[in-house]
Image: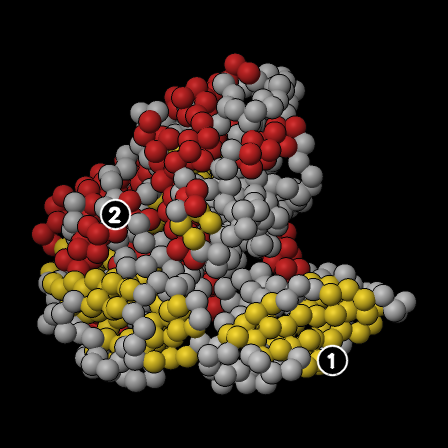
């Protein structure tokens, strides 16, 4: 009948109609108290008591807007689900007077129905925090800390936040904070670091799946970096308010100490020191550098093999296949249509436990994988780290949910109740506690047969952003709140990587979410995006910034995965750019199997656009990609060993070159030898490229070009501006010679 949650859903960027706003006020602030009530409620009052004062009764304002929960949006089924989750709902509200520091206030709500019946909530308490120069211990090595800048926000429960400032020189640029889509140089901006599923338009919102409390500060003669050693949420004002100060604010959740690591050296040395602390990546097999193919609607063995046959028919080499729609969409462990007995104890199955109907969706999964391996194609399966509870679980999922709760294998609320996903994707699902060894063992044991018997080569570890809540309990009680939430995607990829290693396979996971420590766990892609030029430009920024934080294996859904198929120009310009990124892959969103298809296969894009250039040009770049595998492999090994990132901004190699910063969001280096300048706008016939100092070679013409200048070259649709360092050209020339 009536509901109030002081912290609401704890969506990082939105408030809900049942919460206190702000949830943790500062002295002098008032709070808006929100309540949701059933339609039967005609009046709500708040009973409010402050300290030793008398209890006051305040009426709440009635809802002023209609419930628009049915809102929808263009852009696919996920866009509609997100729109419904963010739609405004009606709520009752009242605003308190300003709160004084040192006073604990109590309040509750009383609802009255048309019949005169009343319902009361429990009593809630709230106390304002206050900022002061004392309250805890901040450890910052070196002399970057601005004297007198440290402040602590403290409430009755202890320290809530700390903020401090680091000195910024006028000629320094600031890169990092994880994978970012809006800008490479964050100077002059404000941002935060919290794992969040920003479905599409990440560049416009400034949010990210893969944040890190780390930044690289690049000056013309020296560079440095810092790492806020916390997994809780952090905020940054990068010279936006005071130009010579980088202000950091960090959530403390009652802790009275915070440590900040400082590093110095060249940009590559700074990143190496950070990764040495956060977790060093490992070398992945060469096949990860070949073309990856995927489509969400490839939901049968026949369809998968038809798409692989089409690759062969069109002479487009493919090295990895990601199958998303393979499972029963409930357990994510059993192939759809498989017949098997339920393990009531939630235990694992073996391949022999399953019967695959000859007329079913997947009549012979192992035979399919064996055939793909014979074609030199590796296979990854899609995963979600949740136990779906909508619709009401049945069969093996119901048994798994019971076993997970009984065994203590799930993330819980502070009071011990199982956490139910508060996000818009798979709402109310249970979440495995992958920070707990016993939960990881149980969860991965159910997938072991896929690796050991079916022969799966890796997993697409999608959806690691579902933990919302300041007091959730992870690690079987060892980790609480935001620290566990941000670490969840790291533990998620780690769990699957450990499973693959234990079966003698390389730990190839493909994640979109992450945090500090993700560097050590597999490959990443830039998440969900529409097929637009803006999305393309954001992806280039994301790749450069992810690399600046030590992510070696990175890619994106070339030309976007959502909405109608891209036009031929966008598709081919994106394919050209992806051929020179660490991971080259295409993917398409679920579209309810409606016609015409929205697959991003080159043959479907060719058919949909009617452009005869699509197939031959895509084929050209796919063959070029095959020729670059050895170069990519050796360059990745160098990055893993502590060298400069595989995909990196020009400023890594030319930190004192201000002209390199002018192209930081649209040019990059791939390894030590190749400079890449994607064509990022439509209708381009020529493209300006900045070449830093040195001697370069145009890879398409073989002509030498001196550095230290902007060159303008023609950009036919089958070429992308790429320049090779002259010293490396003899070893790379063959890759660009006599392409189909």
Q: Residue at x 24, y 82 (%)?
A: 148
Residue 264 in view: yes
> Mark 1, mark 2: which one is toward the viewer?
1
The answer to whether residue 556 is seen in the rendering is no
Q: Residue at x 25, y 68 (%)?
A: 138
Q: Report whether 237 appears left or right of 71.
A: left
317 to 679, vertically: above or below: above
Residue 344: percent from the left, percent from the top?
A: 60, 24
Residue 517 image point, x, y percent: 30, 50
Q: Which residue is mark 1?
A: 59
Q: CA distance from mark 1 to mark 2?
A: 54 Å
* Picture coordinates of residue 96, whole percent (x, y): 61, 82
Image quadrant for the C terminus?
Answer: top left
Please tell me how crowded label 1 is: few (under 14), some (14-19), or many (20+) other residues with Cα within 10 Å.
some
Question: Label 2: how many residues lie within 10 Å, few (<14), some (14-19) or many (20+)?
Answer: some
Left or right, residue 210 beside residue 723: right
Q: Is residue 649 above or below residue 277?
A: below
Task: Identify which residue, 292 or 48, lies in the foreground.
Answer: 48
Q: Quick one: 282 or 250, which is closer to the camera? A: 250
Q: Secondary structure at mark 2?
A: loop
Q: Quadrant of residue 240?
A: bottom left
Nearer to me, 324 or 85: 85
Q: Which residue does the numbered mark 2 point to in the structure image?
A: 279
Most extreme residue toward the right is: 115
- Which residue is drawn at the image coordinates 43% and 19% (left, top)? 453
Are the residues at dot 1 and dot 2 in contact (C-beta closer than 8 Å)? Answer: no
* Residue ID at (76%, 73%): 44
| Left or right, 118 with reference to 715 | right
Disc on the earlier residue, 1 or 2: 1
């Amino acid at each position: 009948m009536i509901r109030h949650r002081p912290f609401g859903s704890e969506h990082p960027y939105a408030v809900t109609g049942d919460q206190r706003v702000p949830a943790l006020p500062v002295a002098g602030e008032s709070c808006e108290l929100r309540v949701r009530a059933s339609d039967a409620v005609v009046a709500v009052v708040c009973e409010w008591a402050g300290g030793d004062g008398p209890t006051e009764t305040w009426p709440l304002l009635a809802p002023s807007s209609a419930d628009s929960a049915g809102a929808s949006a263009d852009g696919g089924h996920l866009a509609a689900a997100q729109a419904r989750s963010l739609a405004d709902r009606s709520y009752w509200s009242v605003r308190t007077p300003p709160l004084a520091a040192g006073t604990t206030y109590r309040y509750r709500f009383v609802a009255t129905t048309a019949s005169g019946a009343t319902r009361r909530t429990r009593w809630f308490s709230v106390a304002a925090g206050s900022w002061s120069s004392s309250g805890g211990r901040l450890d910052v090595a070196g002399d970057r800390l601005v004297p007198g800048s440290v402040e602590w926000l403290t409430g009755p429960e202890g320290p809530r936040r700390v903020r401090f400032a680091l000195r910024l020189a006028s000629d320094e640029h600031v890169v990092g904070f994880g994978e970012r889509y809006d800008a490479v140089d964050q100077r002059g901006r404000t941002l935060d670091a919290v794992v969040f599923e920003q479905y599409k338009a990440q560049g416009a919102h400034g949010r990210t799946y893969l944040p890190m409390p780390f930044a690289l500060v690049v000056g013309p003669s020296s560079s440095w970096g810092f790492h806020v050693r916390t997994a809780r949420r952090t905020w940054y004002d990068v010279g936006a308010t005071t130009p010579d100060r980088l202000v950091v604010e960090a959530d403390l959740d009652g802790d009275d100490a915070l440590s900040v690591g400082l590093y110095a050296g060249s940009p590559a040395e700074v990143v190496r020191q950070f990764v040495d602390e956060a977790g060093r990546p490992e070398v992945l097999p060469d096949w990860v550098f070949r073309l990856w193919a995927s489509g969400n609607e490839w939901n049968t063995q026949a369809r998968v093999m038809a798409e692989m046959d089409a690759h062969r028919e069109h002479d487009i080499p493919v090295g990895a296949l990601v199958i998303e729609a393979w499972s029963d969409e409930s357990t994510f462990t059993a192939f759809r249509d498989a017949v098997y007995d339920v393990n009531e104890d939630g235990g694992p199955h073996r391949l022999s436990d399953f019967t695959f109907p000859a007329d079913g969706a997947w009549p012979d999964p192992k035979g399919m994988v064996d055939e793909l391996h014979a074609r030199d194609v590796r296979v990854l399966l899609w995963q979600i780290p949740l136990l779906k509870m909508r619709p009401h679980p049945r069969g093996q999922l119901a048994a798994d949910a019971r076993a997970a709760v009984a065994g203590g294998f799930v993330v819980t609320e502070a009071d011990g109740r199982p956490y139910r996903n508060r996000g818009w994707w798979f709402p109310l699902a249970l979440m495995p506690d992958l920070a707990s060894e016993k939960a990881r063992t149980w969860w991965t044991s159910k997938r072991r047969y896929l690796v050991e018997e079916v022969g799966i080569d890796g997993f697409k570890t999608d959806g690691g952003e579902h933990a919302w809540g300041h007091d959730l309990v992870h690690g079987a009680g060892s980790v609480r709140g935001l620290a566990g939430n941000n670490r969840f995607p790291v533990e998620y990829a780690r769990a699957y990587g450990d499973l693959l290693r234990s079966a003698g396979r390389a730990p190839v996971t493909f994640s979109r979410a992450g945090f500090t420590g993700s560097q050590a766990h597999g490959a990443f892609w830039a998440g969900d995006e529409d097929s637009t030029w803006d999305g393309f430009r954001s992806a280039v920024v994301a790749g450069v910034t992810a690399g600046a934080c030590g992510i070696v294996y990175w890619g994106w859904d070339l030309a976007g995965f959502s909405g109608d198929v891209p036009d031929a120009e966008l598709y081919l310009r994106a394919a050209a750019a992806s051929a020179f990124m660490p991971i080259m892959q295409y993917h398409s969103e679920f579209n309810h199997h409606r016609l015409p298809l929205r697959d991003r296969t080159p043959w479907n894009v060719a058919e949909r656009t009617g452009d005869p250039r699509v197939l031959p040009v895509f084929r050209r770049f796919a063959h070029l990609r095959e020729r670059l595998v050895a170069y990519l492999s050796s360059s990745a090994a160098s990055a893993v060993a502590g060298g400069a990132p595989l995909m990196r901004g020009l400023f890594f190699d030319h930190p004192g070159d201000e002209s390199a910063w002018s192209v930081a969001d649209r040019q990059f280096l791939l390894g030590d030898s190749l400079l890449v300048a994607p064509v990022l706008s439509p209708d381009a016939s020529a493209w300006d490229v900045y070449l830093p100092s040195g001697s370069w070679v145009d890879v398409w013409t073989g002509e030498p070009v001196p550095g230290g200048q902007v060159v303008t070259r023609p950009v036919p649709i089958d070429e992308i501006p790429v320049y090779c360092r002259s010293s490396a050209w003899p070893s790379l020339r063959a890759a660009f010679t006599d392409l189909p």
